[in-house]
Image (spheres, rainbow, N blue to C red):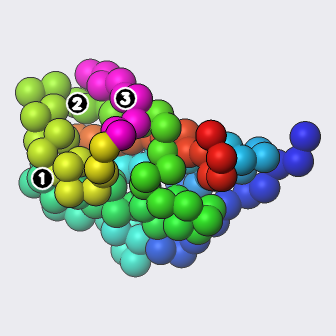
Amino acid sequence: MKKTVIYTDQAPEAIGTYSQAIRVADTVYLSGQIPLLPETMSIVSEDIRAQIDQVFKNLLAVANAAGGDLSDIVKLNVFLTDLSNFPLVNEIMANYFAQPYPARAAIGVAALPKDSAVEMDAIMVIGEA
């Protein structure tokens, strides 16, 4: 099984022992993205809307580096420190995705890295499904 590491400087660098994404055949596993600005590695804002938007931008950058885009995502996991913000995820997600939407899970968590309010990871399939 050949694994290809995906990297782009258009998304935050990995802040631990992981890769931004790994491709195996036509499947790409995107690591969790928090709302870091790639240029500064700092949280974009304390505003939850800005954080959600930045996470989607980061996922898009990694998806592009793998040769795909957000429409290739088949599974999206959303982690929120406050599940009452989930309607905002739906609202902002509509700016990045069109039907058919990916399968999705929303998970409430106690804390996320760097005190962010949101993190998302994804599985993407490039090519014929």
- How far across and down, in percent of the image, does residue 88 sit? 11, 41
Question: Which amino acid, mark 1?
Answer: Arg
Residue situated in front as seen by the camera: 43 or 74: 74
Q: Quadrant of the N terminus?
A: top right
Comparing marks 3 and 2, which lies closer to the viewer?
Answer: 3
Residue drawn at the location 19% of the way across and 41% of the way down: 89
- The residue under label 1 is 49
Residue 43, visible in the rendered structure: no
Residue drawn 31% across the image and 22% down it: 107
User: To which residue does mark 3 refer?
Assistant: 104
Label 1 with label 3: CB-CB less than 8 Å: no
The kind of residue on which mark 2 rests is: Thr
Identify residue for label 2.
81
Q: Which residues are magenta?
A: 100-114
Which label sits in the foreground, 1 or 2? 1
Q: Is residue 127 visible?
A: yes
> Could you say where residue 64 lies in the image, as x and y percent from the top left?
53, 67
Q: Residue 60: within the magenta? A: no
Q: Residues within 10 Å of mark 2 (few under 14, many from 20)?
A: some
Q: Quadrant of the C terminus?
A: top right
| SS for dot 3 | strand
Labels in figure, total: 3
